[in-house]
Amino acid sequence: MKLTKHLMILALVIFAFSACKTTRTVERIDPKETIDLSGRWNDTDARLVAEEMVKDALARPWRTRFETQNNKPPRIIVGTIVNRSSEHIASETFINDIERELLNTGLVKLAQGKDFREEVRKERGDQQEFASPETTKRWKKELGADYMLQGTINSIVDQFNKQKTVTYQIDLKLTDLENNDISWIGQKKIKKYIEN
Amino acid sequence: MKYHYKNSKLFLALIIVVQFYSCATYYQMNNDFQSKFQKAQFEQSLTFLENKKKAGKGKDRLLYYFDKGVVCNILGKHHLSNEYFTQADLYIEDFQRNYGYEMLAIITNPMVKPYKAEDFENVMIQYYKAKNYLALGDYSAALVEAKRLNEKLNQISDIHKKKITYKQDAFGHLLMGLIYDANKDYNNAFIAYRNAYNVYKDDYSKDYGVDAPEQLKKDILRTAAKTGLRDEIDFFEKQWNTKYVEEKHSGGEAVLFWQNGLGPVKSEWSINFTILPGQVGYVTFVNEEWGINLPSYVGSADERTRLVDLKIVSVAIPKFNERFSMYNRATINLAGKTSTFELAQDINKIAIQNLKDRMLRELGVALLRVALKQAAETVARKNDKDGLGVALSIFNAITERADTRNWQTLPHDIFYTRINLPTGKHEFTVNTSGKRGNISKNGFVEIKNNQTTFHTINSVETTQVF
């Protein structure tokens, strides 16, 4: 009798628990909030690097020298950022962060990069055929960039048992498109310690 | 009278339990489907699954999605295949542990719980989804699958401890490389290919006997060159004692997968343990033949005494049975070129090793389950409830099962090759060979200018199982 009662209680408990699942919660957070979960390259890394390196680049003599010589701000195009690390890093979003930082300073002009330029030209070509003459944008009116910004992202991993350090090294170079001179080189390192 | 009435109710309940529980393994329960699939009767297999729509709602729905996805992929129904694999993908992503099922599993067996895929099975979802998108010419969507695959591979390498063999998936990285390559993202393709090479070199070659394919090495050098990574080219040229020579390619590329045979299926076996008293609050389950000593915490002295009185318990644990492939080698002839397929993934070995690594954990859980059931039975008998004791004994014996579920439509191995071809339609002949002879299969690929076309050849022929 006692055992039957126990079995019935057990059955009831199982029935009750069948409604219990681990639940998922979703919380919206500020995109600027720093949250490091896996130790890999994340949005905070991209944002910090873009902010600091653009600030450094624009504070160097090449900019004021150009403005003095040409009486206008320099025009920059952001080229390729080559990923040499072992992680898949979304370099497109990193490039977007750099472009945004450059433009928001108001100190330089920004030219459209190769990824979207073709679409712009296709639209311009479309206008030649379909848009009204007074609104059609003309060919050969693009302003050439004065400098190209390119770079690399590399990582060095040191690992033993459950401990790991990852050092990201981001190198950026600004090249004069007329004479091929390198006008600025910047480097930033981010080091993370991860313990499992 | 009252006692007799109570016993009748008990045995009626038992009859219901006997009806509910089957002694067959998951493979045997799905024999109708498996027999058609193994004979390459794919249309009939699909019809069979379509008549079993209820299976798509039950605890084994993940396996139903897998099987239907695979059959549709083989039949060229790529949209439909992806519908099922997407359902599978989201089911795993949203999976939440149900404590009711967990408790039920403890007093019956693990087959009552909803099936959640093994890590290597989870990775294979992206393989099939990417192949479907690539076959449909949707390279951007395939890229999304590459990114999802990257997230899964990161998760696997983050959570696994040292004792687990499957910590990284070389084929997963290789697949990512192929997708990035097809999308002309040579930087990411290089990283993925290099990661794949490192896993083949450091893990796969010693754990599964799978070396880095020669095609992979060529692709590493080619994508390094396209990305401008001269120092990487120098590094690998030294390592492989080779010289990179840029090949001038016109037309397009064909990447061909050969899915050979079928992966292993689970059955179960019983192992006996003697129960010996351990330290306070513990007993030790011992099997001298297998050299297993498993301490288990049981709590009270009474509980410990009860278990030690049992002396011997028998537990059911799963094991894999290999379905040996008919063939072990394949070459392809097309447009006057011959290429040999290279082994990229040995799913059979990964599955078997994965289960071996988990064996101790499976044993621990199984022993706890059996111990609880047997203890309840002993209590019933001692309290002079012979009818209930016998009923419990039968119930325990019937419900004591190992979890024999796994994705049983995966291939035994996956091989691949890459060929540069002129634009246009090309007929091919695949010659497969093995101990049981040779067979040829014909087909065609359509090559588009400056694009990569993916195609799969299936050889599901396998040795018959139980």
Image (cartoon, rainbow, N blue to C red):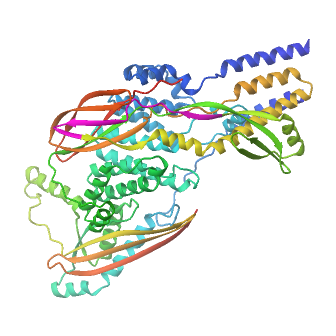
* Front one among B42 and A37: B42
Is residue B222 visible in the rendered structure shown here? yes
Residue B7: horizontal and vertical position, in percent?
84, 16
When the figure is inspected, residue B94 is found, relative to residue B223, above or below; the finding is above
Is residue B327 on the magenta stretch?
yes
Residue B398: horizontal and vertical position, in percent?
71, 24
Residue extent of the magenta highlight: B317-338
Residue B54 appears left or right of A56: right
Residue B42, by quadrant, is top left
Residue A123: horizontal and vertical position, in percent?
16, 54
Residue A60 appears left or right of B92: left
Query: Which image quadrant: the N terminus of chain B?
Result: top right
Q: Residue at x 19, y 88 (%)?
A: A68
* Front one among B464 and B139: B464
Residue B416, by quadrant, is top left
Residue A177, by quadrant, is bottom left
Is residue A97 on the magenta stretch?
no
When the figure is inspected, residue B385 is found, relative to residue A62, above or below; the finding is above
Q: Residue at x 25, y 77 (%)?
A: A174
